[in-house]
Image (cartoon, grey):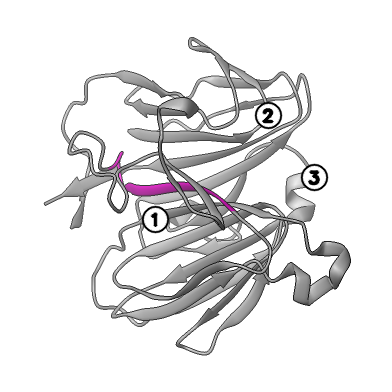
């Protein structure tokens, strides 16, 4: 798959995807909800939006997680909402991902990694029952076959300041402000933590994907959104989003789509 800049006239569209309509993978240690086709859950009409192929909403029990597995030619961004996730990969990178920490792994020519809820090891028995809740998102890189890479950075202070915060971006205009860089020059991920009554205006881009990992909001022109809901915008401009309860949102701004 490759990226294709958007030059043609697009038909304006807003598509709301409710939490209950997502495919789910459940095991004794994992509760995963999929916004797009994933694994055995394949729907040819729901493979991506813009450049975003995966938006998995995962809860992993303590002392368990994803064993070592491969990825190739994918930009993978992980955003933790609760608990902590331990990352280890074949390039020697390791780290603990927690709320307020931006993390990106570039799979490139090929990488092996594991993701575990090791809170019981990190904090002792008192943390043994804490699950880790995170959203993992995949976009394709501009070019295949690059060198695998890893980056993480704390952005808690920026989130506390309010508004949409660039979390990961390949857009030139975010070169000095995005927490981490991704290898796609047409895509950017923003996040916001909102208190009741607070508002943000979504970016104006050919393709937007809004995901609500927690909280209740009202979207201009659409209405109520609750945890697990997603909205896919095509050529619609940037509407306003208002928090009804304490909420967190993840917004992908994309100026290209997949070709091939």
Q: Image quarter for residue 213?
A: top right
Q: Earlier in the sequence, mark 1 or mark 2?
A: 1
**Helix, strand or loop under label 3:** helix
Query: Which residue was labeled with disc 1?
Result: 138
Question: Which quarter of the picture shows residue 8?
Answer: top left
Q: Is residue 233 magenta?
A: no
Question: Label 2, on which residue?
Answer: 215
Locate residue 37: give its quadrant. Answer: top left
Between the residue at mark 2 and the residue at mark 3, the CA separation in whole angstroms equals 16 Å
- Across and down, in percent, residue 186 comes to 35, 51
Which residue is under mark 3?
160
Please provide percent x and percent y for residue 114: 50, 75
In depth, the one of 56 and 78 nearer the eye is 56
Disc 3 packing (10 Å; few <14; some 14–19; many ≥20)? few
Q: Compared to 204, does 61 lie above or below?
A: below
* Of 79 and 124, the residue lying toward us: 124
Quarter that holds the N terminus: bottom left
Q: What's the CA distance linking mark 1 and mark 3?
A: 26 Å
Residue at position x 37%, y 49% from top? 54
Q: Residue at x 44, y 30 (%)?
A: 204
- Percent across and percent down for residue 161 are 79, 43
In this rendering, position of residue 48 left or right of residue 76:
left
The nearer-to-camera label among 2 and 3 is 2
Residue 57 lies in the magenta stretch: yes
> CA gap, disc 1 to disc 2?
23 Å
Q: Element type at marker 1?
A: strand
- Mark 1 closeness class: few <14, some 14–19, many ≥20 residues within 10 Å: many
What's the residue at 60%, 81% (across, down)? 94
Give the residues drawn in magenta, as a range: 48-59
């Amino acid at each position: 798959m490759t990226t294709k800049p958007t030059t043609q006239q697009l038909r304006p569209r807003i598509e709301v995807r409710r939490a209950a309509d997502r495919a789910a993978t459940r095991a004794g240690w994992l509760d995963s909800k999929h916004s797009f086709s994933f694994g055995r859950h394949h729907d040819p009409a729901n493979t991506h939006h813009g450049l975003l192929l995966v938006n998995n909403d995962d809860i992993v029990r303590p002392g368990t997680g994803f064993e070592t597995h491969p990825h190739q030619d994918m930009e993978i961004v992980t955003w933790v909402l609760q608990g902590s996730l331990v990352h280890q990969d074949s390039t020697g990178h390791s780290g603990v991902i927690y709320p307020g920490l931006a993390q990106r792994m570039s799979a490139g020519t090929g990488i092996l990694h594991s993701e575990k809820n090791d809170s019981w090891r990190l904090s002792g028995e008192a943390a043994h029952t804490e699950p880790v809740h995170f959203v993992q998102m995949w976009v394709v890189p501009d070019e295949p076959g690059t060198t695998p890479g890893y980056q993480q950075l704390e952005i808690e202070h920026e989130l506390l300041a309010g508004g949409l915060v660039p979390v990961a971006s390949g857009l030139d205009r975010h070169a000095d402000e995005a927490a981490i860089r991704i290898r796609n020059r047409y895509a950017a991920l923003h996040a916001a933590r909102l208190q009741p009554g607070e508002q943000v205006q979504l970016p104006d881009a050919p393709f937007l994907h809004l995901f609500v990992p927690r909280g209740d909001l009202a979207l201009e022109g659409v209405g109520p959104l609750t945890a697990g809901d997603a909205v896919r915008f095509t050529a619609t401009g940037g509407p306003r989003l208002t928090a009804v309860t304490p909420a967190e949102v993840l917004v992908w701004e994309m100026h290209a789509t997949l070709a091939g």
